[in-house]
Image (spheres, rainbow, N blue to C red):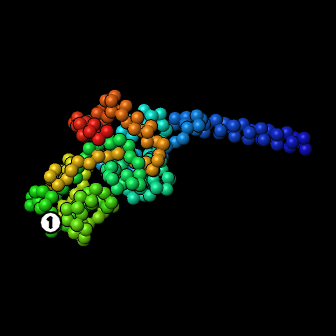
Amino acid sequence: MLKMKKGLIVAVVAALFMALAACGKSTETSSPSGAEKEGKQKITVGTDAAFAPFEYMQKGKIVGFDADLLDAVMKEAGLDYELKNIGWDPLFASLQSKEIDMGISGITITDERKQSYDFSAPYFEATQVILVKQGSPVKNALDLKGKTIGVQNATTGQEAAEKLFGKGDHIKKFETSVVAIMELLNGGVDAVITDNAVANEYVKNNPDKKLQVIEDPQNFASEYYGMIFPKDSELKAKVDEALQKVIDSGKYTEIYKKWFGKEPNMEGLKQQQ
């Protein structure tokens, strides 16, 4: 009886070791790119997935122009990465604390931001526009004087509004551009100042909302998006090199046409290089 028990114990222990070995093998091969096996670091990238068509949630996945461009750049650079939806303000805080390695979220390169962060070479030319209800008397930015303006908090849309009309209650700040647009539809603001691609995408996808986009190059200058890093990041050089290769190969144009339905104007980007 005792001998049989000892044999049973040996068999159980052997089986347990075999199971643990099998688990270890499964974990190693389940890595999407074999990064752990090769000892490569997985890059953590933050975004605010509420900025269509650049990044937004679709069936639980982050999709958009930025998401596709990031994927092409990281593949070109040979870097394994994870894109996380963490929100606009937390994105900048996470870069400061180095909880994430970089960010991409339609982020305009500004002198003020460059004091605290590093940026990649520009990858998108944008401008601010005005979004109003059809039939609005607003024809340009100066017509917004005395009206209530909606903006996304801590964006260049807010900066543009405050530069024209000063700070105050006449400028309402929201967590996202979409929330600001909802306030416009509900009559809480007279207009929304936001990025041109975002405004045009919303109007195109929601014709029943009867909104219109007003461009005003006299008062809204071109601005450029860049991928963002903590200060003195070693990643910047690798990403810049890969981004240029993606542009030169024609992959950038392919992604741009997919999301915007037209050829990109590369002259503005070339002048910023």
Along the viewing direction, whichever of 228 and 2 lies nearer the viewer: 228
| Residue 150 lies in quadrant | bottom left
Q: Quadrant of the C terminus?
A: top left
Quarter of the image where the N terminus is located:
top right
Question: Which residue was labeled with disc 1?
Answer: 145
> Which quadrant of the view contains residue 182?
bottom left
Q: Nearer the viewer, residue 116 or 145?
A: 116
Q: Image quarter for residue 190?
A: bottom left
Question: Which percent across, then down, holds residue 86?
Answer: 43, 54
Left or right, 53 with reference to 220: right
Q: Is residue 68 visible?
A: no
- Residue 114 in sight: yes
Locate residue 96, reporting x and y percent: 46, 55
Q: Residue most toward the top?
A: 249
Q: Residue furthest right?
A: 2
Tell which of 68 and 169 is nearer to you: 169
Vertical arrangement, residue 59 with respect to residue 160, above or below:
above
Identify the residue at image location x=48%, y=42%.
234
Name, please, the residue furthest toward the bottom. Answer: 169
